[in-house]
Amino acid sequence: MQLRTFLAKDMKEALAAMRAQMGDEAIIVASETLKDGTVLLRAGIEGDKALPGASEDMPRREPAPASNDTHFAGVENRYRENLLARVRGTNPRATANATPFSCETLTTILLSHRTPLTIVKVLIDEAEKSGLSDMNLALASALDTFMRTENFDATDRGAVLLMGMPGAGKTSVAARFAAQHCLAGNSVVLAATDLETAGQAARLESFANCLNVPLLRIEAPEMLADAIQQAHDSQAVLIADTAACDPRESLPRDLVKFLSAGNANLVGVMSASGDAEEAGEIAAALAKLGTTRVVVTGLDLAKRKGALLAIVFSGMQIAHVTSSPYLADGLESLTPMALARMLTSHAQSPVQAAA
């Protein structure tokens, strides 16, 4: 579905603008009356009825509930204020230490991250359409159109199976998930299904000992199915670390059996320090296997964030990211504004030097 946002003095004017730009087949996705009485309306139209200038290739995220993040809430408020200012014909409010928006500068920034050209074009178009004068706000607005996030929290029980490429950080993510639930007071069980790769089970066992949680050595899919059922029955959290694989290739038969054992959430683990094109392919392959969410690791190791952008534009929901090698730093959330700042801060020096 392709989405657009309209801001008007009342619902009648917002509906008129929606129909003028999107036609009678547009569907109202969400609407909100702001404090000053103006109406913010978000409407969509199915992808096969393309809007003028809209991308048909990139998946756009569905509107999410308002964030509880007070920092990003402030950014959203400033975004709305700027929208209101443009509608009323007044100048948008200046942002402290703002970098002026420029298509050329943003192109340079995105290319410096080795971002695929298709993504660069879409982000430039969306940022320009936002009409925001601040570089970070315009880029965050563009990212918000496509970025889908769904964090894991203490209420998520049952079983989670982690899968991904070799070296993506699955075992470390398993330990961070376990620590997160332990701190919330949940009963946690770690499970190792890869008993063949040297050191894998031993490493997970060391994490289990540090967290004082049990470790199951799963030798067969039937054992995993039983463990998953027990976790559901006892309201515990089972976190299983599977054997590394390339989801773009045919999976080993044993791994397929483990992935299909019981009622568990399949979660992908991907590294941000890689080629952007390959990251997009891996994310798409994980989605085809039934992965619901992905955890992106190694943001501290990836100077260029093109791979992270490719994952965002794959349509995959990003559950969490990691930007530290230390388990105590846990799992972090990613917002469009945080990602925009990552992108612009990396390229700030080269851009200024070029200027």
Image (cartoon, rainbow, N blue to C red):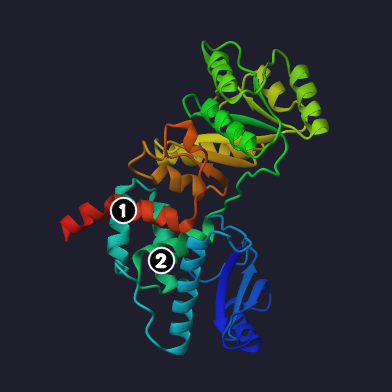
Q: How many marks?
A: 2
Q: Quadrant of the N terminus?
A: bottom right
Q: Above or below — where is 112 with respect to 200?
A: below
Residue drawn at (42%, 42%) of the image: 307
Element assignment for label 2: helix
Name the kind of residue labelled 1 in the image: Ser
Q: Name the residue carrying label 1.
A: 345
Q: Quadrant location of residue 18?
A: bottom right
* Residue 28, image quadrant: bottom right
Residue 323, percent from left and from top: 42, 40
Element assignment for label 1: helix
Mark earlier in primary sequence (2, 1): 2
In front of the other: 266 or 290: 266
From this viewpoint, is residue 298 visible?
Answer: yes
Drawn side of residue 247 relative to residue 102, left or right: right
Circle 2 crowding by C-alpha within 10 Å: few under 14, some 14–19, many from 20: many
